[in-house]
Amino acid sequence: MDTPALFRLLGDETRLRLLRLLAREAMNVSELTAVLGVAQSGVSRHLGLLRDAGLVEEERSGAFSWYRLPAGANGDGSRTHLWNWLHEEFTHATPATRADDARLEEVRRLRKEEFAQHGDARQQLVPGRSWAAWARALGLLLPKLDVADLGCGEGYLTIEAARWARRVIAIDRSADVLERGRRLAARRKIGNIVWKRGELERLPLKDATIDIALLSQALHHADAPAAALAEAWRILRPGGRVVILDLRKHDQQWVRAKLGDRWLGFDDEPLGELIEAAGFEDATVRVGSRRTGDPFTVLIAAGTKTGPGPWARGRRS
C-alpha cells in the first residue's frame, strides 16, 4: 500500500481506536464491538481493511478469530516510523479513548470471571467449573420464594432466579426489552415469570406480596433511588429482603449518554444509609467485584424488612 493510501486508511477515528485497543490486548470481534460501541459489521469491515494493509494480524483459535498487532508493531521492521508515531498518538487520552479503556477493563473482568482461556496457557482449565452452575446450585438451598426483578432489562437474571423461585415478576420501563425477555424465557421453556411494564419509583405490584426484591445494576438508572428503595420496601412481605448489585461511585461520564445512567454509582456508606432510610434493617454493603485498573467496582448490598419472613417458615409448597 502506498503512503497516501495508508494515511487515508489511518484517517478514520474508529480504525485508530481499533489499533489502540489491539496494542493493549488481542481481542475478537465481539469484544471489540462491545468496547467501541460500533456495529459488528462495521468492526469487521475496519478489521478487514487493517488486515489487508498489514496493520493487523488475524489468528483463528477455537470458535473465534483473534486480532492483534503484527510483530513489527514493537518498533522494528519496515514501518518503524509509522509504529512509533502511532504509539505516540495512543498515549494521548480523549473522552472516547478513556471510555474505551474502561470498557476494555470490563472485557478483562468478564474473561477472568468466566475462566476463559483466550489462548493464554498460563490460566488453569478446570472442566465443568462454572459460576452459573454454582449460582443455580445455591438457589436450591432457598425456600420457594416470590421474587421481583426490578429493572430486569432483557431478563437474564430473571431467568436464573426463575430456576429456584416459586415465581418471578420482572419489571422494566422498556416494552422492547420486556418482549426480548419473554422470547428468551419461551426459548428456555421457563413459565413461572410474569413480565410487567413499570417504573422503579411506581411499581405495578400490591403491598407485601414479594419475598425478595432484586435491583441488579438498576438503581443507578432510577430517577430517585430513595423512592425506588421505598417501593421495594412496600412490596416486600415482613421478613423479605432487598438485594442490590450496583456500582461504587466512579468518574466515567460516558455512561450517561451511552448507557442512560442517571447516577455515577454510589458510595458505600451513603448506599447503606439509603437502604436504612427506606425502612430496611441490617443494611449491608460490600464489594462484590473489583480489579486493579478497572474504573468500575461492583457493590453488593442487602436489607431486611422487619418480621420473621419466609426464611423462618421453611420451604413452602
Image (tube, grey):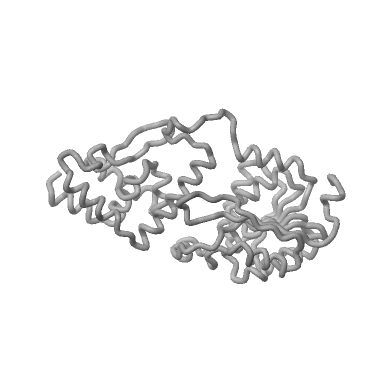
Q: Residue at x 39, y 47 (%)?
A: 32
Relative side of 19 to 252, left or right: left
Q: Position of residue 215 (x, y in %)?
A: 65, 58
Q: Position of residue 231 (x, y in %)?
A: 71, 67
Q: Residue at x 45, y 52 (%)?
A: 293
In the image, 76 versus 14, the foreground residue is 76
Q: Residue at x 54, y 63 (%)?
A: 249
In the image, 147 versus 291, the foreground residue is 291
As drawn, 150 above or below 127: below
Q: Position of residue 299 (x, y in %)?
A: 60, 56
Q: Position of residue 266 (x, y in %)?
A: 58, 64
Relative side of 95 to 308, left or right: left
Number of marks: 0
> On the image, which quarter does residue 282 sit in?
bottom right
- Quadrant where the N terminus lies? top left
Relative side of 61 to 57, left or right: right
In the image, 275 versus 235, the foreground residue is 275
Relative side of 257 to 71, left or right: right
As drawn, 99 above or below 274: above
